Image (cartoon, rainbow, N blue to C red):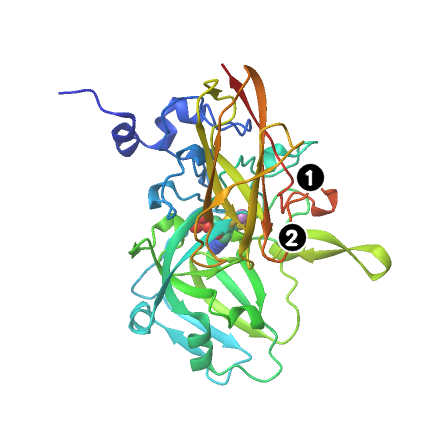
Amino acid sequence: MSAPTRRELLKATPLLAVPWLSGYSNGQGAEPPTAAPFPGRVVRMQEPQNLEFPISALQDTTTPTDQHFVRSHFAVPKIDMATWKLKIEGQVENPLELSYDDILKMKSETKPITLECAGNGRVFLTPAVRGLQWGFGGVSTGSWTGVPMAAVLEKAGVKAGASEVIFVGADQGNIAADPSSPGPIHYDRSIPLEKVLKSDCLFAHKLNGEDLPASHGYPLRGVIGGWFGMASIKWLNRIIVVNKPYQGFWQTLDYSYFERRDGGMPSLVPVTAIDPKAVIAKPSLSEVVPVGQAYRIHGAAWAGEQKVGQVDVSVDGGKSWERAKVQEQPSSLAWAFWEYSWTPAARGPASLVVRCTDEKGNRQPDKRDPDRRSYKINHLVPVEVLVK
Ligand SMILES: Nc1nc2c(c(=O)[nH]1)N[C@H]1C(S)=C(S)[C@@H](COP(=O)(O)O)O[C@H]1N2
Ligand SMILES: [Mo]
């Protein structure tokens, strides 16, 4: 019998038992410094399971399901499919209870949608802040299949005056860290009705053509295209249409940031749409790049509800910039791949930086804005390599 490859080993072995994987889990943000792309996800937390997409292995615009990042605040809930229903209540003419079959019988759409965790890149914040220490890979693009939310809400008949929809997941638990939760709470979130009715929003039952894996919300999840991942509720079983702003834990104490509104006063607002951002897949942090040879710097760029306008690359730490070649983007909801051919002339350390500007001209900021607390992390982060 031949020796198993790393990939076979990973398939056969629980992540907990893979020592070289857990070695990369503690906050350095660096990919393993191997030459060959490492196909497994980086463990950021064992229980609940939180896994990072291995950005240096970026290859297909659709992230393979076994590489898609996972962000879960609580354990995967136990769900009994014999009794499972999606309940639709609140400000509707016809409260509904839809079975899984009822949902599968409705007309579904399939679209590529990029989900990015609002804390993606947190390991690059100084001073360090609490929360999962994501490197570049708290982001992935799935081919999501689901029923447009507008179709379900139309069946329910939204009452005049309704302004938002609360989505509730079946998972729950206590938040012990200050500010703590008032006892066990579900993971939940409200979204303005105006956004929910857009074609960007699906009740998704398939990822990459297969039933949702348990870790991604089986049997049903919301997918709120263009918004940070926290809005796409997994293990969804209840939605409540309301006519006043909902002030749940996950959009006030958590996943909120300061906006300078009225007279410049910092006002806490919920995190919503994804900001423009580009990341370098290759070279990886600390990679050794050969001198005098063309090297294909490549990665992905996305801009939430806007299309990517342009991507620029700097090979001198941000002093000078060149345009990267950007591939056709299917819609604003999915990332675009970009590349830039670099022939380093001199040996020594080099600092590579990439930046994205959306179609409306919004560009990634050079420096971190502390008003954003520990979310919306899209300031420029250099990738240091060694030319040899
Ligand atoms: N029910 C539920 N939905 C959830 C979460 C959760 O913990 N529970 N995490 C959210 C966050 S913060 C993110 S970034 C995305 C991640 O989706 P994924 O695990 O499918 O990548 O799910 C969101 N939906
Ligand atoms: Mo997230």
Query: Which kind of residue does numbered mark 2 sit on?
Result: Asn
Horizontal relation, residue 234 to residue 351: left or right: left
Q: Helix, strand, or loop for circle 1?
A: loop
The residue identified by callout 1 is: 366
In which quadrant of the rendered view does residue 221 lie? bottom left
Q: CA distance from mark 1 to mark 2?
A: 12 Å
The front one of 152 and 136 is 136
The front one of 240 and 290 is 290
In which quadrant of the rendered view does residue 162 lie? bottom right
The mark found on residue 74 in the picture is none
Q: Position of residue 30 (x, y in %)?
A: 51, 27
The residue identified by callout 2 is: 362
Q: Residue at x 35, y 33 (%)?
A: 39
Query: Which kind of residue does numbered mark 1 sit on?
Result: Asp
Q: Position of residue 140 (x, y in %)?
A: 44, 46
The front one of 75 and 49 is 49
